Image: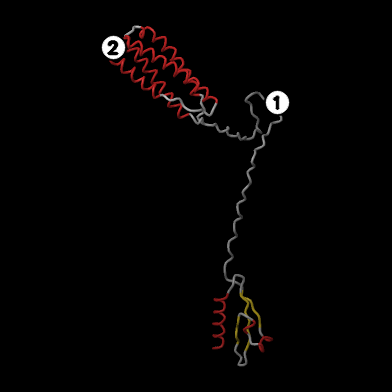
Amino acid sequence: MRDLRLTLCLVMVLIAGGLAAAGLTLYSYQDDIGQTIVVDSLERIPEKYRDTAKRGFIPSFRSTPPPRKPAAVLETVPETVPETVPENAASLAPGQSTANDRFSVTAPPDEVAIDTGLASAAHTMEQLRLIHLNYERVYLAARDNGLQFPAVGYLHLTNGQLIVDFAMPGAMSTAAGTAWQKDARNLYDQLRSMHVSITSWLSTTSPELVAAMPMLLTRTKSLLADLETAFSAIPAGQ
């Protein structure tokens, strides 16, 4: 009985310590005094008992792991999408589609270059608008209140400083920008010429100022409107 308990304990120890996923191979033999000894390796059996040793196999008690899900297969997206033309395309009316029409991908528009002088051009436009607006105020103040009205002289001096500080933008990088720059130079020359005339009229208190300015302002207003159109045509990357 003692030998049996010893044998069972040894078997349990071997099973608990060395059981692999696929099972465990054991060897048993009897020694000279009749004890049954179980080992997990043939090399652990003395050579004189190996011929009579018995081999046994204990299957694994571990549960079979669940099957793994197959990995997702990613399809390669083609670089270009072929365009399919329906066979009866020639007989379709404009705007009519067929049941076999396929989704088509439209290439994005080409990137629009930004004129490098756009920021300076925008500042120039603000200056020209202000100079022209001040001249309109000069005319209205002189017409309604006379040439000696304080606002007339103040607005005239303000425009004089704006004209002195005026700076035309450097080279524009697009054809539209270059065309705008030419028109801006023309308007500036007209406004500067008007300033010289107003200076002369104010110095002599000439009524010619009130008589001539409507025609001058109409001309410069038309030039300013054309300049606004040319400015809107400058590429802004939109």
Q: Which residue is mark 1?
A: 90
Q: Quadrant of the N terminus?
A: bottom right
Q: How is the image coloured?
A: secondary structure
Q: Which residue is mark 2?
A: 148
Is residue 238 in view?
no
- Counting from the top left corner in percent of width and height, residue 149 is at 28, 13
The residue closer to the viewer here, 100 or 227, is: 227
* Residue 12, disc: none
Label 2 to label 1, Cα distance in Å? Answer: 79 Å
SS of the residue at dot 1? helix
- Counting from the top left corner in percent of width and height, residue 159 is at 36, 19
Residue at position x 57%, y 71% in the image: 61
SS of the residue at dot 2? loop
Asked if the residue at tag 1 contacts the one at tag 2, i.e. Cβ–Cβ closer than 8 Å, the answer is: no
Q: Amino acid at mark 2?
A: Gln
Residue at position x 65%, y 30% in the image: 98
Q: Amino acid at mark 1?
A: Ala
- Counting from the top left corner in percent of width and height, residue 177 is at 51, 25
- Counting from the top left corner in percent of width and height, residue 232 is at 49, 24
Q: Is residue 93 above or below residue 99?
A: above
Q: Is residue 14 above or below residue 143?
A: below
The single residue placed furthest to the right in the displayed view is 87
Residue 142, picture quadrant: top left
